[in-house]
C-alpha cells in the first residue's frame, strides 16, 4: 500500500511558496546584514574622524580620554591588571558619537516601558530627577570621618573649634517624592553609622543637615523647593536653611542667622538644567529656576581664586549664567582655595570652610559673619593645620554631601603637618619665642647651681619658673660645682668674682654664667636678669659670645657688648 501523501497537500503548497520566495528573502537578509555592517562601519569611521571631547557640558564632567597601556616601570602593567581594559570601555562609552542623543532615546524608552528610572536616575513625582545611591561604602565613609575627627583633636589643642555638617542627598531629602517601590532602609542605616562614628570624637561638633531639611520638605507650610529637580544640589533656599542650622550651632560667638526677610530674591535663570537631567535622558522634564539671595552690601566683598589669582567683587561669577553649568556662578565653581574678605579691608574673624560644591551657594550667607578661607581638598594639597596657624583661623567648618563622603577618601591627608603646626602654635602663645646663648636655643640648656646654702636652690627655681612661663621651655635643673663639665648651661656660680659687692652676667663659650658677691646674693643676680631680659621681653633675643654685664653695687655699670 502506497502511504506517500498526495500531491498538492497543504505542506506541498507551503514548501512551493517558500521555494519561490527564497531568492527574494536572501536579498532582504543580505540587505539587513549589509545595512547593519554599514552602520557599524560608519559609526567606527565617525568615531575615528571626530576629535575626542575633553568635557561634557551636558553632564558637567571630564570625559575619559584614550588610555595608555604602559605605566612607569611596567610596560604591560595596565593591561595585565585589567585597568587598561576598564579605561578603554569608559573611553568608548564617553566618546561615542551622538552620545547625548542616544541617552535621550534610551530615557524615553525606559520610562515608556514602565521602569521608572534610567541610568540610575529615578523619575519622582512633580518631575524630580533623583539619583539612586549606590550601596553604602562604609569603608570610604570611615576613611573620611576619622581623619576629620583626628584633625578636630589637633584643632582643640590650638583652641580652634571644628564643626562637621553633612548634607543629605536628593534621594534621602526628597524620599517622599520617590515611587513607593524604592527602599529606604539603607539610607537610615548609613546616617546612624555616621552618628556612631562622629560620637567617638568629642572635640568635633557634628550637625546632621538631612533631618531639618526633610522636616521642612515634608511639612505642611509651603516654603519653595529646597533641592533642584534637575540637579543634585540644594537650591539657594535650601542653602539658606542649612546656613541657619550651622550658625545657630556656633553658640560660643552669639551669632544669629539673618532672617529670610533680610534678603531680596534675584532670579538669574529660568533655564537651569543640572547634571541629573543630563544623565537621565528625560528631556521632557522642565528646567529649574536659579535664584541669588541678595542683601545690602553684598558687593562690598572681594572673592579671590587663589589657584589663578583672579578676583571679582561680590560672590557671583555671572559668566557661568551663559553656560549650562550655571551652578558654578556661585564663587566661580570648584577651585582648590578661594578667599573672601571685605573690600574695605575690615578685619574679622576667619572661618575655614572645607567643602564640596554644596557649600558654594551657602558662601554669601557665611560671609555676613566671617572672612572666609575656602578649601576643596580634591584640589588642595598643602598642610591644613599649618594653614590654620598661618592664617589665624578662628573656626573650622567641614561641610559636604553624603555622596562624596561615601565615594572617595577626600580627607585622608587632613592630619598632614599637624605635629609641626602644634609645635609652632605652642611657641606662638608665649611672649618670648626664644632666648639664645651664643646662637643656641635655651630650650636645650640646663640650670646648674651648687648644692650649698646661700639661696641657690630658690634662685634656680625662680629662674626656671619664669623661663617656663614666658617661653614654654621646661629646663632641666641640676646641682654641681664642676661647671667646666657643662656645655649649654645656665650656671649660678659661687666662685670667680674677686671683688665684694659685684654681680656679673656673662657668656663663656656656650654657657651663661650668673655670679654675685653683692649683698642680695645669687637671688639678686637672677632678679636683675629677669627684670632686664624676661619680664618685658618679647620675640627672641641672643646673648652673644663675649657678652659681659657687670654691676658694682649700682655705682659702676658696664655692658659689653649688647
Image (tube, rainbow, N blue to C red):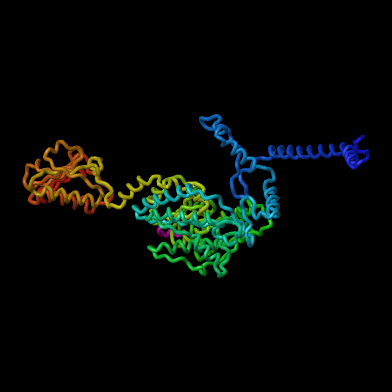
Classify residue 519 as left or right of residue 340.
Answer: left
Q: In this view of the protein, which residue sits in the foreground, 214 or 555?
A: 214
- State whether residue 20 is above or below residue 516: above
Residue 286 forms part of the magenta stretch = no
Looking at the image, residue 146 sits to the left or right of residue 44; the answer is: left
**Could you tell me if residue 58 is visible in this image?**
no
Residue 408 is left or right of residue 543, and the answer is right
Q: Is residue 485 above or below residue 59?
A: above
Main secondary structure along the magenta-highlighted residues? loop
Question: Which quadrant is the C terminus positioned in?
Answer: top left
Q: Among all residues in the image, which is located at the extreme front?
A: 1
- Residue 219 visible from this viewpoint: yes
Q: Tell me where residue 84 appears, x and y as whole percent.
A: 58, 36
Single out the residue that lies furthest toward the right. 7
In this picture, is 16 found above or below 176? above
Q: Quadrant of the N terminus?
A: top right
Q: Residue at x 54, y 53 (%)?
A: 332
Closer to the camera in the image, 249 or 428: 249
Displayed quadrant of residue 156: bottom left
The answer to which of 174 and 237 lies nearer the viewer is: 174
Q: Is residue 160 left or right of residue 187?
A: left
Image point 34% across, 48% down: which residue? 422
Q: Please provide percent x and percent y for residue 158.
A: 34, 53
Residue visible at 70% across and 50% down in the picture = 105
Residue 426 locus on image (x, y percent): 31, 50
Residue range highlighted in magenta: 343-349
The image shows residue 486 at horizontal and vertical percentages of: 17, 37
Q: Is residue 346 magenta?
A: yes
How many callouts does the rendering have?
A: 0
Amino acid at each position: 500500500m502506497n502511504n506517500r501523501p498526495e500531491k498538492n497537500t497543504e505542506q506541498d503548497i507551503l514548501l512551493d511558496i517558500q521555494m519561490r520566495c527564497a531568492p527574494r528573502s536572501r536579498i532582504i537578509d543580505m540587505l539587513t546584514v549589509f545595512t547593519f555592517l554599514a552602520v557599524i562601519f560608519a559609526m567606527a569611521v565617525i568615531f575615528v574622524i571626530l576629535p575626542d571631547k575633553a568635557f561634557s557640558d551636558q553632564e558637567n564632567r571630564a570625559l575619559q580620554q584614550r588610555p595608555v597601556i604602559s605605566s612607569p616601570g611596567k610596560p604591560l602593567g595596565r593591561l595585565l591588571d585589567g585597568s587598561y581594559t576598564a579605561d578603554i570601555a569608559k573611553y568608548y562609552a564617553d566618546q561615542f558619537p551622538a552620545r547625548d542623543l542616544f541617552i535621550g532615546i534610551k530615557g524615553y524608552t525606559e520610562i515608556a516601558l514602565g521602569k521608572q528610572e534610567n541610568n540610575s536616575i529615578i523619575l519622582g513625582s512633580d518631575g524630580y530627577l533623583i539619583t539612586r545611591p549606590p550601596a553604602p561604602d562604609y569603608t570610604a565613609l570611615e576613611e573620611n570621618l576619622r581623619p576629620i575627627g583626628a584633625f578636630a583633636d589637633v584643632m582643640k589643642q590650638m583652641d580652634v573649634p571644628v564643626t562637621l555638617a553633612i548634607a543629605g542627598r536628593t534621594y534621602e531629602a526628597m524620599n517622599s517624592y520617590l515611587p513607593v517601590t524604592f527602599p529606604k532602609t539603607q539610607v537610615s542605616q548609613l546616617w546612624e553609622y555616621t552618628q556612631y562614628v562622629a560620637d567617638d570624637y568629642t572635640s568635633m561638633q557634628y550637625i546632621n543637615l538631612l533631618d531639618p531639611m526633610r522636616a521642612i520638605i515634608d511639612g505642611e507650610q509651603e516654603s519653595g523647593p529646597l533641592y533642584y529637580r534637575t540637579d543634585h544640589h540644594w537650591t539657594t533656599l535650601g542653602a539658606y536653611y542649612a546656613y541657619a542650622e550651622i550658625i545657630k550651632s556656633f553658640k560660643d560667638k552669639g551669632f544669629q542667622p539673618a532672617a529670610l526677610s533680610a534678603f531680596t530674591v534675584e532670579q538669574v535663570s529660568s533655564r537651569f538644567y543640572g547634571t541629573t537631567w543630563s544623565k537621565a535622558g528625560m528631556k521632557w522634564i522642565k528646567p529649574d529656576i536659579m535664584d541669588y539671595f541678595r542683601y545690602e552690601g553684598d558687593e562690598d566683598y572681594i572673592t579671590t581664586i587663589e589657584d589663578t589669582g583672579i578676583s571679582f567683587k561680590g560672590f557671583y561669577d555671572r559668566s557661568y549664567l551663559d553656560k549650562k553649568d550655571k551652578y558654578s556662578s556661585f564663587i566661580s565653581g570648584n577651585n582648590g582655595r578661594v578667599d573672601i574678605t571685605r573690600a574695605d579691608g575690615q578685619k574679622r574673624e576667619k572661618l575655614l570652610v572645607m567643602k564640596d560644591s554644596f557649600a558654594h551657594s551657602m558662601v554669601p550667607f557665611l560671609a555676613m559673619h566671617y572672612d572666609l578661607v575656602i578649601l576643596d581638598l580634591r584640589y588642595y594639597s598643602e598642610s591644613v593645620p599649618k594653614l590654620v596657624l598661618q592664617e589665624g583661623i578662628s573656626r573650622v567648618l567641614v561641610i559636604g554631601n553624603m555622596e562624596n563622603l561615601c565615594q572617595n577618601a577626600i580627607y585622608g591627608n587632613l592630619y598632614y603637618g599637624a605635629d609641626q603646626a602644634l609645635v609652632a602654635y605652642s611657641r606662638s602663645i608665649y611672649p618670648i619665642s626664644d632666648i639664645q646663648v651664643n646662637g643656641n636655643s635655651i630650650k636645650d640648656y640646663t640650670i646648674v647651681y651648687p648644692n650649698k646654702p646661700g639661696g641657690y636652690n630658690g634662685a634656680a627655681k625662680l629662674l626656671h619658673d619664669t623661663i617656663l612661663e614666658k617661653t614654654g621651655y621646661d629646663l632641666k635643673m641640676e646641682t654641681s660645682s664642676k661647671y667646666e663639665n657643662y656645655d649649654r648651661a645656665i650656671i649660678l656660680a659661687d666662685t670667680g668674682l674677686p671683688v665684694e659687692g659685684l654681680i656679673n652676667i656673662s657668656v663663656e663659650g656656650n654657657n651663661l654664667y650668673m655670679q654675685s658677691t653683692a649683698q642680695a646674693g645669687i637671688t639678686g643676680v637672677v632678679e636683675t636678669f629677669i627684670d632686664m631680659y624676661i619680664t618685658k621681653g618679647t620675640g627672641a633675643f641672643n646673648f652673644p659670645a663675649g657678652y659681659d654685664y657687670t654691676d658694682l653695687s649700682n655705682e659702676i655699670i658696664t655692658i659689653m657688648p649688647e
